[in-house]
Image (tube, coloured by chain):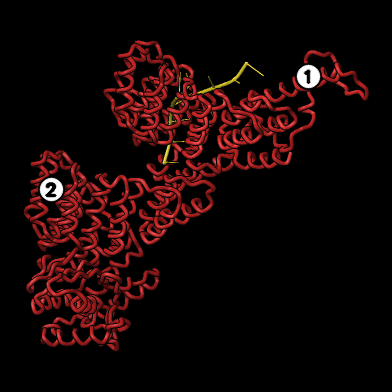
Chain colours: A red, B yellow
Amino acid sequence: MAVALSHYNYYHNSVTPRNLSGKRSSDSKPKEDSIVVVNPGASKPFRFGRKKSKTSQRSVEQARDLSLMQALRSHIDSGHMRDAVYVFEKMKHSDAYVWNLVIRGFAENGLFWEAIDFYHRMGSEGVRADKLTYPIVIKACGATVSFDEGEKAHGKLFKLGLDSDVCVCSSLISMYGKLGCIEYALKVFEEMTVKDLVSWNSLISGYVAVGDSRSSLMCLLDMQVLRMKPDRFSMISTINACSMERLLRSGKEIHCQVLKCGFELDVMVQTSLLDMYSKCGRVDYAERLFCEISLRNIVVWNAMIGGYVLNSRPLEAFACLRRMQEADNLNPDVITMINLLPSCTQLGAFLDGKSIHGYASRKGFLPHVVLETALTDLYGAFGEPKLAEYIFGEMTEKSLITWNSMISTYIQNGRNKEALELFQELLIKPLIPDATTIASIVPAYSEVALLREGKQIHGYISKWEHNQNSYTLNSLVYMYAKCGELDTAREIFDRISDRDVSSWNTIIMSYAIHGFGRESVELFSEMRDNDVKPNYSTFVSLLTSCSISGMVDVGWEFYYSMKIDYEIDPGIEHYGCILDLLGRAGDLDRAKSFIKEMPLAPTARIWGSLLTASRNHRNIELAELAAEHIFRLEHDNTGCYVLLSNLYAEAERWADVERVKSLMKQTGSDKTVGCSLVETECKVHRFVNHDRSHDQSNMIYHVLGILLRKLGEETSVHRITKFRPLELKNKRASSPDYHSVRLAVCFGLISTKVGNPVLVRKNTRICKDCHGAIKKISERTKREIVVGDSKVFHHFRDGNCSCGDYW
DNA sequence: GTAGGGTTAG
């Protein structure tokens, strides 16, 4: 009994609401009277007397066994597995039949691990598993994605000579498909002497499970060539294959077959078709099918709701939910909730999302790995990483998708450091990162811009099986560009065998942020020569490039061309770039009217562009107007305060400088501590302004002193005080001579090989003084110096900078 | 007396 009780606890803990909801009473202890059953053949219940003859003793035992067997069946049929096991323990169970019943009971109730445990217990109690045990156990191994268990069971059944059984083999094919080992599935299939319809269907669904839609469709054709007539199972699996890869044409062909074979009234076939059409973007077809379904169960409704959500029609999704409740009197289930959460994001309806969370909680849908993951996404999308973090932390079961969701939540909310830490934690878990993980984490490396770490992730990716995935390679291209190694970025781009539009957009943007506008434009021509059609993002990259490199006319050409030649309506990013172009050309009036005439509501980024232009052209009035708009949208925009304050300082309006500073204090926005980084092979060296903490500080200051003296008077003439207090008492401290970027450049010069460029990364924009000084340093030292600030890379060479002195 | 393949979800 001890064994049985330990099992009870296990079952109880691992039961998900979906498995046993509504099937169990709240009383956790099995009731005695539920197992002392009435003998159906007798008019009275049995009474156990003291003295009995041998014959009557046997008949009593037989009757008892019969009663227990009936009780066992009844508990299994009603899903009461705890009670079933309780009865099982009271029975003689030397026969595989009883064991098979219980194992099947577990599997049917979704308790697959328990099914596997019971199979092991069966072996340890000396009862041999038979050809009816294995299909269930194998199915359980597939469902729990347990390769080791599956392989062991396969070995065992092979030894027992059960590998020639068609049912056993079909279950093996299906299991290997679910485990992602399609080659094993195929081997089992090929070695089968007799293949029936189920074997074919198992292989078809195996291909679907591993995402190989085309092979599953080929399989459907192959079986027909061999005169094997497909059934509804074959249809459902191949329809799913079409959904997965949005193969609308094949989907329609299978729809025709469905009609020809007369499966069109099968609700599961109908649901699969509905789902296929919505996944292929044809909500209209999905709706038509939906109307034709006479008996709509919750799965049909969920598929329709999911279709609306997937096609970004959140209002219709909610309307569909109401119809489901009113017309068919159906209550939403956990899948309905999961489906609806993204539509809350689409609608910007945070409170509705929270209500769904509350409803799910009240209904006992939680814990549920998929729902919790969807909630993590929801909170992440609404800028609530703390709430997402809480859900993630409390989760009892986490899948790779859960981890991916939390990582991207951090990234979406600018928490790159946390994302990277979580990724490192994932690496030590028994989960293997997939393309989504990699595609989301690599940009985080780009943001922290540490080449050393970026190279580590590159090393990891090189060993990883999906390393030729274009998403991954695109993200690596951008990572290297952002970390300052444009050449490496280009090398990786050149090695991508199937460059998609994103690959081109990425490389164009890479050249853009390095200020190489002409190269960006050339790459665009090359992209067109390769018959790759530009999209919305292509023009963001191109216009960014034109604005950074000051290619005003070319920029305007692209702006008109995207509308006329490519029918792409400009979005807010494009307008931002055009404003940068106008600002750069000093056309402030036109910039102002451009904002007014824009068909989209101006964002802080748009006003920020006007602010930068006003600052660069010393138009305080316009800068104030822009700042006012920015503060209305983002009251704590630190960059805006700093820029405005610098502008006042340049105009020597010290009272205004103080006013801005106190405003900053009031809003609680702290000035970002500017720092500059230089990476050597084994270390990241971080400098702040006037830093003396570095080991080689004396040397750095000594060299910098020499360089500054060499630069002569120019630096002091350019000395424009930033953020200087009214009293000027910290005049020395605010001097740009020892700004972090100069210290970093200096350290770079003495710590890298002559001939190699010096790479410095900076978290704020470079100031005019330092820009001028580094130009001269590059000339005097004959070294190439690359400084990546918070927006662009400045390539200093021979006294010039790639930005053309405008940033 | 009990087996194998199937619909909606992150």
Read off the residue under disc 2: A559
Label 2 amino acid? Tyr
> How busy is the neighbourhood of tag 2: few (under 14 within 10 Å), some, or many (20 plus)?
many
For badge 1, the amino acid type reads Gln
Q: Same chain, marks 1 and 2? A: yes
Q: Residue at x 42, y 16 (%)?
A: A194
Q: Point out residue A256 in the picture as x, y percentages from the top left corner.
A: 32, 15
Q: Residue A595 at what x, y percent from top left?
A: 20, 54
Residue depicted at x 41% and y 41%: A342
Pointer 1 chain:
A
> Along the polypeptide, which appears first: circle 1 or circle 2?
1
In the foreground, A382 or A483: A483
Residue hosting label 1: A62
Label 1, label 2: how many angstroms apart (C-alpha)? 89 Å
Q: Secondary structure at mark 1?
A: helix
Residue A757 in which image quadrant: bottom left
Residue A477's place in the image compared with A78, above or below, is below
Compared to residue A239, the image places residue A114 above or below, namely below
